[in-house]
Image (tube, grey):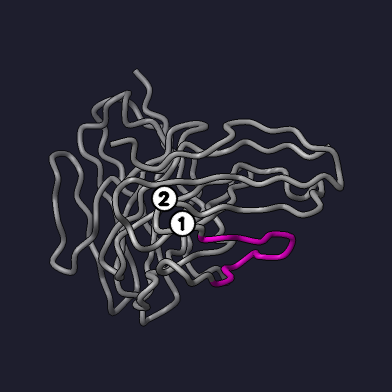
């Protein structure tokens, strides 16, 4: 099992460009999440999907959109990138319910110039 | 006030030392609690879940005090390989199980 995979690993964008970050999990998890992590800080939730067909905003959703394509895949789109979106983006998944831990992908390091 | 607060450290300790990290949370309805470990430029990985009765895994002991809304992690006999950032994570009781992360406590174990 690959667990949670993310593509790309690194990306440099110019201000105003758009891109989609891809995430897939092979653990048959219902819930999936997108976080960003800025230097010296914890993870902040951007969007999450409790189950296939549902998505909800997290703590910092502005400037992002998501698509839960199927049970395995959850993508994050930046429509018009801004320097403030320079960050490391982590995708995670878990079984549905409060008691289950999350499993993380390796992250995408995004720089917006 | 942040929902989950941790002492950022850094903690610099010699090998073999015992070190304790604390974490407080503000949402009394929080359901589940975890400690994650994050190595530099890597993804967080689960270190241990935290149960009401307290739990131990080798050199690591986690405690939960629901009345004080407080979680702790104790590391005994520190190893060089324990150097990392430790993240306190609180999960709510919704079906989605949204997690709130502390900013992390950085530990450096020195020879």
For residue A34, the mark is none
Give the Cα distance between marks 1 and 2. Answer: 8 Å
Q: Give how far across and how far down residue B86 sits, in percent.
A: 40, 45
Q: Compared to B47, does B70 lie above or below? A: below
Specify the quadrant of the image occupied by residue B97. Answer: bottom left
- In the rendered view, tell whether residue A72 sits above or below residue A98: above
**Mark 1 vs 2: CB contact within 8 A:** yes
Residue A107 placement (x, y as % from top left): 52, 39
Chain letter of mark 1 equals: B
**Of the pair B1 and A82, the residue shown nearer to us:** A82
Query: Tag 1, which secondary structure?
Result: strand
**Rendered residue at 30%/74% (across/down):** B31
Residue B56 image point, x, y percent: 14, 50
Q: Which chain carries label 2?
A: B
Quarter of the image holding residue A65? bottom right
Residue corresponding to mark 2: B87
Write the residue at 40% across / 52% down.
Answer: A72
Residue A61 magenta-drawn? yes
Q: Magenta residues, as a range? A: A56-68
Report the residue marked by disc 1: B6
Q: Which of marks 1 and 2 is nearer the N terminus?
A: 1
Q: In this view, does A16 lie to the left or right of A63?
A: right
Q: Nearer the viewer, residue B108 or B39?
A: B39
Tell me if residue B41 comes above or below residue B57 in the rendering: above
Label 2, secondary structure: give it: strand
């Amino acid at each position: 099992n690959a667990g949670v995979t993310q593509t790309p690993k690194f990306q440099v964008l110019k201000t105003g460009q758009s891109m989609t970050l891809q995430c897939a999990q092979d653990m048959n998890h219902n819930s999936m999440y997108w976080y960003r992590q800025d230097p010296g800080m914890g993870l902040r939730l951007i969007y999450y999907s409790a189950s296939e067909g549902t998505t909800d905003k997290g703590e910092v959703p502005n400037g992002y959109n998501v698509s839960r394509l199927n049970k395995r895949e959850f993508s994050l789109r930046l429509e018009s990138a801004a320097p403030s979106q320079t960050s490391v983006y982590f995708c995670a998944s878990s079984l549905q319910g409060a008691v289950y831990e999350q499993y993380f992908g390796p992250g995408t390091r995004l720089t917006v110039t | 006030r942040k929902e989950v607060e941790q002492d950022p450290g850094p903690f610099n300790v010699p090998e073999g030392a015992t070190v304790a990290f604390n974490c407080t949370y503000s949402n009394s309805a929080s359901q589940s609690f975890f400690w994650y470990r994050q190595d530099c430029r890597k993804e967080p990985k689960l270190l241990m879940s935290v149960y009401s009765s307290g739990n131990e895994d080798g050199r690591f002991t986690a405690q939960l005090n629901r009345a004080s809304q407080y979680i702790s992690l104790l590391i005994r006999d520190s190893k060089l390989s324990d150097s990392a950032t430790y993240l306190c994570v609180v999960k709510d009781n919704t079906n989605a199980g949204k997690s709130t992360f502390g900013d992390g406590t950085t530990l450096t174990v020195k020879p």
